[in-house]
Amino acid sequence: MYPTQYLYISGQFLGGEGRKTQDIYNPATDEKIGTLPHARPADLDAALEAAQAAFESWRWSSPMDRSAVLRRVGALIRERCDAIATALTLDQGKPLREARAEVLSCAEHAEWHAEECRRIYGRVIPARRDNVHQTVVRQPVGVCAAFTPWNFPLSQAIRKTSAALGAGCTMILKGPEDSPSAVLALAQIFHDAGLPPGCLNIVWGVPSEVSEHLIRSPIVRKISFTGSVPVGKQLAAMAGRYMKRMTMELGGHSPVLVFDDADIDRAATQLALYKSRNAGQVCVAPSRFYVQEKACDRFVKKFAEVYSNQQIGEGLAAGTTMGPLAHGRRVESMGQFVADALARGGKVVCGGEKLPRAGHFFPPTVVTGLPDDSLLMTEEPFGPVAPIVSFSTREEGVRRANNLPFGLASYVFTESLSNATYASDRIEAGMVNVNHFGIALAETPFGGVKDSGLGHEGGQETFDGYLVTKFISSMSSPY
Ligand code: NAD
């Protein structure tokens, strides 16, 4: 059921012959399900050369042709949804229903980029003389190197590939070695959709070795990374050393402000369900809960009731609403968050310990009574642990929401327009949701501020990171 994995370089699918391989595991059972070939330095050089050669023609291709490829990609993603989703559940763990939703959202991303890439406009600046013409054009930046993580393997890859290819760039993408199948399925789809060889190349390996090799190469003009803040900073420093452009979609620690005038039961229910998505391994997952004093006990009770009522199991099993964590590192990390919380006087309301079964299962966990400087309140848990504390005034709530160096997503629940406007204007975050969850759609910009990153994916901003601005001033003979 699990597809064979390859490298994809210059339009060729390359297997493990003569290369190191890495085992792939099902996080729900810890059983080996496949192997992944690692790129040798010569493979990385071949990918660089292929991307460079392809750029020379792809950059001049008509936006109509690029749009047609992306449209076919969207259609093929829809057609192959079930197979891609099944493999994604096998190597990443999320419930099949969530895997399908991820795959279908990727079709929308391909389609959105197919439409928008025909609207990459420049401008004309009125000149000081009648025989001078001043234009501003936007051109593709060149060969891009992208690094995508394991939590949404297809979604993170389609955002980068469709933006780069739609803009006329070419790309070498290193996907997540823990959960590779969706990225390779995407390469097959681009291949079948008629993307010329070399425009997209997929490599695997030891992340730090691959990224260093690619970022140092003078062929690569742009870096795009989604992952943790520390790794993002390392890659940004390296990109800075070689003066390369970058887009950084990094972690956050999303604050939630629940005011006492909100519909508390609805807020608690919706937030508990949203937090359980992908077992909490979502960079925009609500992760620090501040509830106004009067409503706090009621919120905790309802939230814990809904959150602990998840059907935990293998993602392919019918009825599963929360799968395993994607790998053992996350389970270990959940244990550390809870241990620190207990040592700091926190109270575990539900969950709290790894489940005694095969696979990387950790139950939905709620912790209350924590100080703001505890590990859970200062570092993104990236898993199914929810700290809930109370606040008094809205000024205090917003100040505490802003007290970390991160700024990705944020959430506000209130029936008061005044509270909603006050909080959404002042929260330091790239995205604010009021009374619902409305982010990460293809047509809306996704990105962070502060340590959470640079640049956007999606929305009309989507191509900005893949284009350079050129000013052309031309003079004809006097009229
Ligand atoms: P990690 O920091 O080791 O890796 C995060 C991602 O970056 C992985 O996909 C990894 O392959 C990649 N990576 C690591 N070192 C790299 C390097 N030198 N060059 C290129 N890529 C590199 O952590 P992890 O254990 O895989 O995940 C844990 C943390 O990562 C989480 O706590 C979370 O904060 C963060 N994370 C964030 C996102 C996101 O969407 N922003 C996604 C996955 C993980």
Image (tube, rainbow, N blue to C red):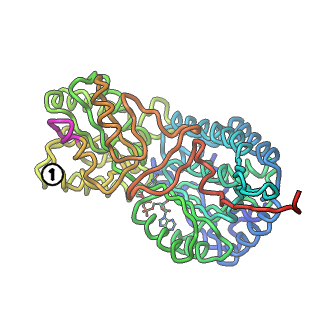
Residue 395 covered by magenta stretch: yes
Quadrant containing the C terminus in the rendered view:
bottom right
- The residue that mark 1 highlights is 342
Give x and y (percent) for residue 150: 50, 53
Judging depth in this view, the residue of 240 and 269 nearest the camera is 240
Give x and y (percent) for residue 9: 73, 65
Please, what is the three-letter code of the amino acid marked with disc 1? Leu
Judging depth in this view, the residue of 90 and 247 nearest the camera is 247
Element type at mark 1:
helix
- Rendered residue at 74%/57% (across/down): 134
Judging depth in this view, the residue of 17 and 248 nearest the camera is 248
10 relative to 161 in the view: left or right: right
404 relative to 240 in the view: left or right: left
Q: Is residue 166 visible?
A: no
Judging depth in this view, the residue of 478 and 106 nearest the camera is 478
Q: Quadrant of residue 71?
A: top right
Quadrant containing the N terminus in the rendered view:
top right
Does residue 267 sit above or below 219 in this rendering? Answer: above
